[in-house]
Image (cartoon, coloured by chain):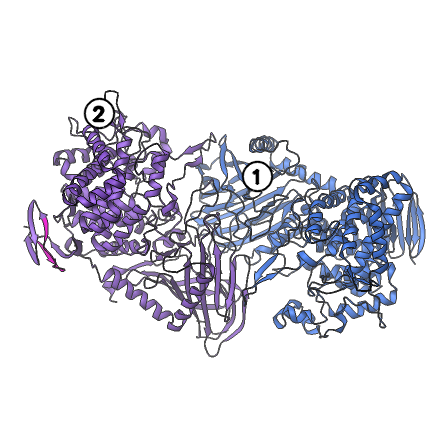
Chain colours: A purple, B blue
Amino acid sequence: MSQDTDLLWLVKETQFDSQKLGKYESILALGNGYMGIRSATEEHYVGEKRDTFVNGTFDQFDDTEVTELPNVPDVFRLRLWVGGYPLDLNTGQLSHYQRTLNLQTGELTREFRWEIGEYALQFASSRFISFADRHVLGTKIVITNLGKKPLPIVFESGIDGQQTNSGSQHFSDGEKRLYKGKTLQYVTETNQSHILVSITANQDFSVGDHSTIEQTRTLMPRRQLLREYTVSLSPSEDLVFEKNAAIYSSRDNDVVYPDQNSLQQAGLKRADELVRDGYVSNLHQSAEAWRKKVWGKMPITIDSNDFMDQLSLNFARYHLHVMTPAHDARMNIGAKGLTGEGYKGHTFWDTELFILPYFIFNYPDIARKLVTYRYHGLAGARRKAAENGYRGAQYPWESSWIEDGESTPIWGPADIITGTPMKIWSGFIEQHITSDVAYGINEYLNATQDNLFGRTYGYEVIFDTARFWTSRMNRSENRQQYDINDVIGPDEYKEHVNNNAFTNYMAYWNMQLAQKLIARLKNEKPEIYRQFDQKMNLQQLAIDLADCLAHLYLPQPNAEQIIPQDDTYLSKKVIDLTPFRNAGKVDEIFDHYNLSQINDMQITKQADVILLLYLFEKSFSSETKRANWDYYEPKTTHDSSLSRLTHSIFAADLGLQDEAWRFYEQARQIDLGNNTNSSNDGVHAAALAGIWNMVIFGFGGIRYLDGTLRITPNLPRKWRSLDFRIWWHQQQLHIHETHDRLEIENLTQTHPVKFTCRENEYELSDRLVISMD
Amino acid sequence: MSQDTDLLWLVKETQFDSQKLGKYESILALGNGYMGIRSATEEHYVGEKRDTFVNGTFDQFDDTEVTELPNVPDVFRLRLWVGGYPLDLNTGQLSHYQRTLNLQTGELTREFRWEIGEYALQFASSRFISFADRHVLGTKIVITNLGKKPLPIVFESGIDGQQTNSGSQHFSDGEKRLYKGKTLQYVTETNQSHILVSITANQDFSVGDHSTIEQTRTLMPRRQLLREYTVSLSPSEDLVFEKNAAIYSSRDNDVVYPDQNSLQQAGLKRADELVRDGYVSNLHQSAEAWRKKVWGKMPITIDSNDFMDQLSLNFARYHLHVMTPAHDARMNIGAKGLTGEGYKGHTFWDTELFILPYFIFNYPDIARKLVTYRYHGLAGARRKAAENGYRGAQYPWESSWIEDGESTPIWGPADIITGTPMKIWSGFIEQHITSDVAYGINEYLNATQDNLFGRTYGYEVIFDTARFWTSRMNRSENRQQYDINDVIGPDEYKEHVNNNAFTNYMAYWNMQLAQKLIARLKNEKPEIYRQFDQKMNLQQLAIDLADCLAHLYLPQPNAEQIIPQDDTYLSKKVIDLTPFRNAGKVDEIFDHYNLSQINDMQITKQADVILLLYLFEKSFSSETKRANWDYYEPKTTHDSSLSRLTHSIFAADLGLQDEAWRFYEQARQIDLGNNTNSSNDGVHAAALAGIWNMVIFGFGGIRYLDGTLRITPNLPRKWRSLDFRIWWHQQQLHIHETHDRLEIENLTQTHPVKFTCRENEYELSDRLVISMD
């Protein structure tokens, strides 16, 4: 790999700092959508979080907590003593420290030299979670004696089930076995959901010819299964430790009859194969899978002088694949991916509005899994609607396992003063999630024309989400206007508002989508229409939709072109956020005002009206858009990682190049920047997807609106070109943008593709070059 | 306190070593029988165990585990940053380090100077658990800026509910409240036993006149309630932190209606009072209570040149009071006291055979609580007998909460090779515990003549334990001899043996005790006899006892005077243990042989036949005792902390002064010695009591046999005198022993006391001096 390529693919920690454990554990995390492991260092430090998650294995600790992804036993744990000194990089002399995540191969390496007392050693480790076989992970550690005397080492590795979710333990003390003196197996079960997890790890330990392994012991402390190797390492010689491991769970969809025995057998079989192939080969297969499945399939190249432009995009894409369960539609993407305990592994609207586009355009097969998850969630959504006295399907604000329904905590911590628990309202009234789900499905259908998905899964969701809204209208006395009262919009500072513009427009759009779909099926596919009508009473739905669409209040721009965020927002007090924004510490506003006070001010957490204008760009004039940008952006704290990405794209749409770039630069720093704490609980899934969105939608100018593809490049001045591919209507398009040309080629060529560029319509059969001068 | 007194009362850690955390956490632990807290350092280290236990709050994590004392939230936690550097004594420059447990006052202090970067500070902390009010604990921390520049400090303290029992979490994420900006309260509940625990802590934080508190924040991470103080400390100035806290639980017997509200109110009220009185006064009250309740009440003085003789005795007595629930007969003493997770807080025969004597002779009111616990355990013991097809009461090998019955784990870890879980046989067949319980009750009755206890509690236990044995006999075909087959004796290396001598003699003694009691009651207290007979059918019991006593096989000395440990022991292979014993590593024998091989050898874990000869000294000749000593001791690994103390006393009885001294010196090192790991899971309750036993029984020559007090001093040559008091027949006796005199004074003088000395009988009314020449 050349120096240049290095810059674009390697994320490095060049200095060890035990105050930044959390950040690097998250951003250097490994995974493959099936499992994710925070990249804690091999040795332990105070404040570390070693989380290992297996996607979908949700468990509820007790009835005061909600279900969450539990922390499964740790495989990468190492305790090491050198001449009696424990390996602790805060002690002794540390030099040549470097930890590197190679985004291209998924390999994490770590190197350093360490001197303690009279001893000196070189430490080199490598680890990966396989992208070729989702059950597989491995690590290799080489320690070299740099001193002139034999180096006495005690090396302890194994499987550690003492991990918890910040103190909540979901697993039983497992069954522990040792096979052939080298293969450790730990089988454990979640307490409430009774999911079995088996972890099988083969450990191979060897030393150079002049060194001796003095003792090898098996240790079985509570919840741990460990092997301890006592060694005297001769000068210049190495010890080499290889660990090849496999994890299976009874939620796996590739294990037939996933009982304890078959999970154990699968682990043993796989461990044997892994040992036969060896660490290097296993790692190579994984790297090849990254190349074949991700990088080689859909390359994206930014030609610019700043390596961060490409690196942050690669970083985002790496994490998008690490967090996404491409293998199983019964689970989805957590708001922190599989990299931390934040948001408990739950899925939010982040998937549909911010992450799904990446997969729709790049890996439509994965996108299909993500939208199918929402079909599987219909039962829970219908249950939620019924429980709240509504019809149709009301989607949970937070989702977990497909069957679990609403997973948002009902009660937050008690108000610290009054002792009254604070109700978390999102699960009750942040209801736009229901239209967001329909929005995601429609985007998928539009982009892929996967009508089979529509008939089998998608339409049912569209009908029942729309039906929910018909039952959700607040009808005024004279029935002239229907309102949607008592909601939370994207601006979560405002609880219990009426007619949040974003919510109302999304509900309207959702109902309209169903109305059009009914009409289309009736006309074009009468047999399918008949089937759905029988099952879901489309006739009645059509009547209700017509009524609601005729009456639902859609907030209109006022005299100053401002769309009121909700019924009362514009009448609230305006305060100047400049001091907080300039200090870069908008969250400090809560040191000055409490939530109730902020509720009474024109302060917005994140893109709300702006998001509406972005999603429905054709419905509003340029003048309205600009006026609302000028009005709302200064009132926005961007206190959600979803905010800046929308602002960047919207600014690019408005031709505000500098603002677009500024928000892009800030947004891509959310995980990769210098803020040491912001990623402690995990990376920000939607914000990472946002990097791709900003590059392709914002600067690349790609958009799909009402089934139409639009390509209107807004390349930043600093970029020479942007080269990428997208899937559209089952054609793979290769797009090359420069400041003066748009080149577009249909690589699939099974049928021509229509698109617009700067208001012009084009039809692409093989290749087109459009001048951008 | 003079230098000399210091030596006798202070246990010190003079060097910080993060490899010895466990040892000092245990031996410096604080407590008052109601609660116990391991003395983890304020700041966190990898490998620490911060256990806080509230006695009796047993909970079962899941049905694969047994009930255990759960780890309640931690109050002593501190995170401290100095100029951005976390307090970590493995970094920077540490000097003047000292941590001191004052056994006399129960105060733990810690001092050090620490330099990091450009900063230097003095740290001084003090903490205690109140011996005056069992719910109370407190700490005070003073940090002084030793540098010439302001010292930026971030200081974070509060209540931390992330603690687990090595990964098993017993408590819910608690309710958290802050009162008046200073009092933190955390209320939580065990998952299975539904015991509420409230922890209320008032935190007062102040700085010198020229320093400033820049910010004070409340933090509520999961399972934590913390206050963070950001300070700039001027040169030479102090920050002073005082924390006064109170813990209540719904198992408390001094809280009426212990529901959540009353536990909260009790905590708040107590915290207010503690703040009003202040840390120094609260500590003083606790120290006074130690003086009044323990040290001043029953002083023991060894006059010798080696301070360790007195210090180790004081250390043992300190821990005996820290571990013993003198306040509540529904709980007992754990094998590791309240100082660690070892043995899960469970009670064994350790209480009756090794710990009870200390309390019987010194604090008979506490001894009464300990034996009453066994009366409360009758229901569980009867259940166990019935479940196993026996009559009467079969006591659990391990006990926990009074109602829980047998608490021994049934299954140990799976055999690591075969995967078959290993059955833990002690709970099934280590049956001598049942006679041990009766033995303890009888000792208490003999020494105290507390007949009310006998009538109310004790006799019932004696009858039903004896009845158990009548149903436990293995009757041979011709009914000429009854055996007790398939047991484990004190030598736990031998599972499933027949006629373990200790077990058989103890069973015989237990039945004989009941027989004599029946006869005595019948003759002397016919009304009481009638009541018991009605309730417990003593007539039938008497018939069964006569039959069993007539036929039970009691192994007799063979031609070489050796009493066979069991039916097959003497026919097993003999191996030479000398190499292992000389290396001081008898546990390494398991690296050479597995349990099944050791089962087939004449290797004994701990005093077994020797314990029998010690307990029933009148039943065996001196010749037999000496022969068995010579035979068994060399075959004993002393791989139980109960073994050496018995050997020391027995050697003293035999006149083997050097051996008695050697075992005493070894036995008192079990917790206080240099072995860094042996106390990691907690101190050794019975071994600590053994220090008192060796001093008073072994060297002091005190013994009570069949209701008779014997005083036959065996003072070690190195001691000039031994001065102590004992309670006997409700008289407090002051005994002063030198090499040539025995002085004995009756301090109570309500009635004269009989005793024997060197085969002579004496009657003591006020004072006697006996020449020992």
Residue A656 in view (yes/no): no
Residue B267: which numbered mark, if any? none
Q: The magenta stretch spans which residues? A: A739-755
The residue that label 1 is drawn on is B197
Q: Position of residue B726 (x, y in %)?
A: 82, 47
Q: Which residue is mark 2?
A: A481
Q: Is residue B412 left or right of residue B287?
A: left
In the rendered view, would you say B361 is above or below B574?
A: above
In this rendering, would B479 be left or right of A612? right
Q: Residue furthest bottom?
A: A209
Q: Nearer the viewer, mark 1 or mark 2?
A: 2
- Left or right of A175? Residue A623 is left
Label 1 and label 2: CA atoms lie apart by 54 Å
* Residue at mark 1: chain: B
Say which residue appears at 87% left-offset and 59% top-offset. B618
| Residue A664 seen in the figure | yes
Quadrant where the N terminus of chain B lies? top right
